[in-house]
Amino acid sequence: MSVKINFPTPSARPGDIPDFSNYKFPDPGVLSVPPLEMTAEESREYANSLIRVLDKEGNAVGPWSDYLGEEGLEDALLQGLRDMLQMRAIDARMLNAQRQGKTTFYLQCTGEEAIGCAFQKQLHPGDMNFPTYRQQSLLVASGYPLKSLFGQYYQNENDPLSGRQLPTLHSAKDYGFFTISGNLGTQYVQAVGWAMAAALTGTDNISAAWIGDGATASNDYHSAMVTAAVYKPPVILNVVNNQWAISSFSGIAGGSASTFASRGVGYGIPSIRVDGNDFLAVMAATKWATKRTRGGFGPVVIEWVTYRVAAHSTSDDASAYRPKEEAEAWPLGDPVERLKQHLINRGKWSEARHKQGVAEIMDEVITAQKESEALGTFLNPQYLSPSAIFEGVYEEMPEHLKRQRQDMGA
Amino acid sequence: MAQMTMIEAVRSAMDVMLEKDPKVIVMGEDVGYFGGVFRCTAGLQKKYGIERVFDTPINESAIVGMGVGMATQGMRPCVEVQFADYMFPAYDQITQEAARIRHRSAGQFTCPMVIRMPTGGGIFGGQTHSQSPEALFTHVAGLKVVQPSSPLDAKGLLIAAIEDPDPVIFLEPKRIYNGPFDGHHDTKSVGWAGHPLGEVPEGYYKTPLAKASVYREGEAITILAYGTMVYVAEAAVKEAEVDAEIIDLRTLLPLDLETIVASVQKTRHCMILHEGTRTSGFGAELIAEVQEACFYHLEAPIKRVTGWDAPYPHAQEWDYFPGPKRVIRAIKETLEA
């Protein structure tokens, strides 16, 4: 006999049949809507179960569906479908553009569109997301100009950041989108500080922290959980559990030991777990969470259960570490297909209109993309002044940077 | 004018700024109710309330990370890391976040915060309460790095740092926190009373960042020092009876090269004194800049006296801490070269 340790491995590798049998998802509609003042202890059930609204047939069922109400709902759902389709079109076009060498790098959010697109609509002006690089759907749903989005992808004169950042690391203060760092987890605790400041300065704004399942292993995830539990500021602590952190499955970050939502309970923060591929569930849960935080009832943890359909980035080959068919086998389905079916059931949409809508949105995206490409891509790079390197390191440029700028000849 | 220790001067600076600007907050481990392990924030919570001056969990990354979130929202956090040695868990937040947010967001977000931390040795703190990590910050674009050597400067520089639009690392030398230092090993601390530098105005004033001061004028050699080492240099100069010019750098980044170069071109000799370890220490940067600007004026190689390249010891503290004896030897070697 000797002591033992555990090395978690995923349920399937390339060549295996995808296996999600370890996921026990409850039926839609079984969970009630808790009071806004729910405590961490009272949230245990929500942290281990799954809030779902859409059933297999695409019908909205249960208390969370009722919570959404009917007023303005159909317009919001149609807009949500449109936003998700636009997001998906951008993903497809940018993957190709990267393969053609027009940009250095891209990260798709395919499969996770519902989360950002539904979440963003519940925020108010002045609220702030602290996103990761896979939440571009927040930007798309906020009405961020495609001109600026593509400008940064192609690093041309429409890039608001003048070539300083990777193509997917946006910064859009006016759209409630905090500047993305690139190293993992740091934004999580910053969101707590931002929410504390929002309260200390007497605003009614809230912040939303975003992190992936893999980065919940980082220091600052825990820093944020501790401080959010201590000061109870108006922050929504989102964990997007998309099953894969590059090649490491969610179990490597501790996801097989407990749900990511239930970790929140351990810290003393009320926590809920939501079907991230169910647009209506995301909408309802976000409505509840924003009401709770804005109402002064403290922070909330939300685990969004979803699946990363694409590779981690254009530098990654997902087929090297997981079955090719795994995305299709994902038991919670495709968020676009599910919302489409729901709208068809409501009599507000049809297969024909969908086909037409997809084509129209793709045309819009291609038009914006072409306009941006005309200003320069990495195949025909536009001259960007190198002096941008030195500008804004400090508010006022110190002497040593002036000397270096002169040295460069900029 | 009031007589203050550096601790009182630092507290007075925060007091003035808490009073002046409602967006200033003070937070850190033990800084609230208790007033800080060095008492720098004593009485401030009582005066300004728990929403302006408060305790944090023991998590430096959280202290700085929360500060970043607050600063980018428009507040002016002045946070304390209890010892400079404890800043390592926060290093990522300081160097890759606070320092870069303005640049990477093209000015959409800015991070006007101050990160205070007691630095250096001389208090028998052993290897995790004695380090001088300034070079780990001066290597980082986007940061400003300040280290005062007197109560007067400590207050004026800290006020300037809190009002500065960029993140400032504010290093407070522990050896001279409680009173003056005659530069000799293991001298008992006494009050600043009677020491000319202990005179500190009660109200608001600023000492500009990025400006060195000529602590002592002289013609024979330029000694570059900051913090506690200014007093070690002074003791050495007195003992060696050398007409040295001592420059107190005050701000290490951005560096006031103009004052340094003017002095070295006059004295034609230069030596550098700091507590931090030698290899890749801040002295190396100073030597590089001085030789580039003053090579044809120099009559001897530039020497440096620094902490040794070994972890800071406990029992052998005074063998590690750079003292006048080593400085005198370096002065002589430079002048006789």
Image: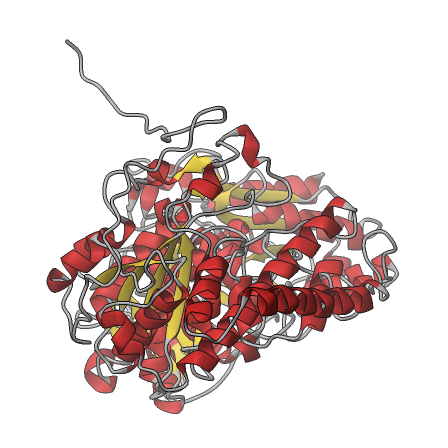
* Residue in front for this viewpoint, B215 or B95: B95
Q: Is residue A16 above or below residue B188?
A: above
Q: What residue sits 51% from the left and 61% below the top?
A: A135
Q: Tell me the colour scheme of the image.
A: secondary structure
Q: What residue sits 72% from the left and 72% below the top?
A: A147
* Residue in front for this viewpoint, A76 or A250: A76
Q: Is residue B280 above or below residue B34?
A: above
From the image, which quarter does the C terminus of chain A lie in? Answer: bottom right
Residue A97's spot in the image, x, y percent? 74, 52
* Residue in front for this viewpoint, B152 or A282: A282
Residue A95's spot in the image, x, y percent? 68, 50
Report the side of A199 relative to B256 (left or right). left
Residue A242's spot in the image, x, y percent? 42, 48
Q: Quadrant of residue A157?
A: bottom right
From the image, which quarter does the N terminus of chain A lie in? Answer: top left
Report the side of B287 relative to B189 (left or right). right
